[in-house]
Amino acid sequence: MPTLRIALAQVNSTVGDIAGNAASVREWSRAAADAGAQLVAFPEMMLTGYPIEDLVFRDSFVSTSLSALSDLASLLAADGLGDLAVVVGYVDADGPAATSSSAAPGAGRRDASALLLGGKIAAKYFKHHLPNYGVFDEDRYFEPGRSLTVVRFGGVDVALTVCEDIWQAGGPFTAARRAGAGLVLNINASPYELNKDDVRLPLVMRRAAEAGATVAYVNAVGAQDELVFDGDSMIVTAGGELLARAGQFTSELLIHDLSLPAADAKPNRAEKTDAEPLPIVEQWIDDEMEIVRVALPVEPRPGGRDKHDGGIADRIADEAEIWSALVLGLRDYVTKNGFRSVVFGLSGGIDSAVVAAIAVDALGPERVFAVSMPSSYSSEGSRDDAADLAERTGIDYRVEPIQPMVDAFLANLALSGLAVENLQARVRGVILMALSNQEGHLVLTTGNKSELAVGYSTLYGDSVGGFNPLKDVPKTMVYRLARWRNTQDDAPIPSNSITKPPSAELRPDQKDSDSLPDYAVLDPIIKGYVDEDMGRDELIAAGNDAALVDRVLRMVDLAEYKRRQSAPGPKISGKAFGRDRRLPITNRFREGL
């Protein structure tokens, strides 16, 4: 049987940095070649970054992608890598964008994969299945491909596929079986959510069985606005054996020697795995995709002499997964957008303490600036906890009392009750934005998903900021993360911040429980209503008190206008606020009415 040493480049790209992304392809391709690889595959849209959203409608952007792809093929050859097969994602076009009056059905922008070899673009493939759910809008942007590209390289037939192609039965993987492919390459930009790695392996096993071929799945790592990509690349045989698996949230090359069937263009036998029962071959959808075969003109470079096993990386615990996603999401947002540092209010409470620890892990203490902004209602314990955290982490820390500024407002405005509470939060927001303007920091807001859901925040006050690391983290998970982080090499979060009752400290003896149900009760209702789209009756049937359900749902519905103005933050759940959940602000529908 022929042997191919393949490398899966689990790497980070930046949307719009086409030159920088191309340079990264060259750098990682050199590393793959130095390790004896004969074929290296990069993630979906590696050349342009992903997702490119409405950039796809700009002819200038598409033409830059196409010219950069051609240049990259030449540069790889000039680097002495002309005999290394390099598979890279990019944006292609065979017609005007869908927004153009001259757009024609069946042509347009394409989410594409190209194989570069011998200084040329040797083969192309256009993504067939286009996701249009959750965070994805690919029907808006792309036209689906109608044919499967199968390249013959090193005596092996290799099929090219892209991301969503593996998430749906039929289409490219059934066509790969019909084509007799020995290897199916699947390049991905698959966003993270908790425990998604548990879903991927059975999925890849099913598609490998469907194709009757080994599947090499490579995923991006990094973050783009709200989305985080966690890697978790892998190689699975047709029989369901996991041969190699990369780590989570790490940039790396997964290199593995594969013994593959010699190319013969005969249909593969569908396999069965131990993952779960699989339908018989005839039940798989076969939309009779055209098979385009390409015989590559260049023989593979000699492989390494000693057998190379990529190994199987250990999975990490839930809290470690989420923490890694939040750290990566913040680091890439700050770095890719050119901010040198971050600033936020450090109250001594649990939320700002966890944000501080995330920021230090993401950026280092020298780039983290925290401000204590006590009012007359701020407890001495909270002030001490804030100072304690600053000392533990080594961040820049200052104290700016707000009471004189609040008093100045109250001397000129007749305010009372909730208005005075909100005034304190807004004065703090003004201070943080002033420091941002003066010193160039990105302001982080520290509210969690539970508060965002029910509107327990002050617009233009504690919600002010450019990025929110905890936007998709429920309050109960904030506590879990704090406890987990304190079990690591250091303990950055004061224990008192974890154990004391949560409070905004905007009036005497205030507690969150004065306004909200206990978070252990509240969070499951929010998860059911927001993440799982459960209705009132379903939530009550799940064991929740009817009056409490009505109260929580009303709070969630009425807070939509606040959420629409909230800062972006990393997605870690099945449905995050923002691009993942889109509801009208003006909306009179109420559950149960």
Image: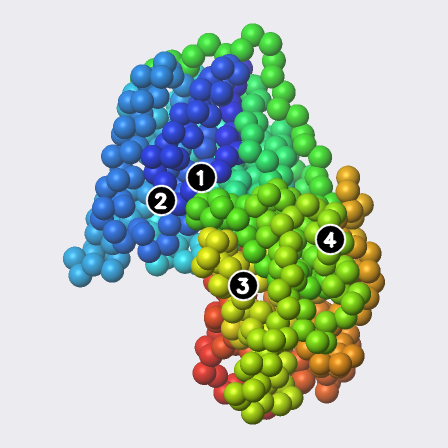
Q: Amino acid at mark 1?
A: Ser
Please indicate whether residue 107 sits to the left or right of residue 221 in the image: left
Mark 1 or mark 4: whose residue is earlier in sequence = 1
* Between 14 and 168, the one nearer to me in the picture: 14
Mark 2 or mark 4: whose residue is earlier in sequence = 2
Callout 2 secondary element: loop
Q: Is residue 193 above or below residue 558?
A: above
Please indicate whether residue 248 sits to the left or right of residue 381 in the image: left
Q: CA distance from mark 2 to mark 4?
A: 38 Å
Crowding at dot 1, Cα within 10 Å, few <14 / some 14-19 / many 20+, comes out as many
Q: Residue furthest top?
A: 305
Please indicate whether residue 536 sits to the left or right of residue 442 in the image: right
User: On residue 432, which mark appears?
Assistant: 3
- Residue bearing the label numbered 1: 13
* Residue at (27% x, 37% y) in the render: 66
* Between 591 and 35, the one nearer to me in the picture: 35
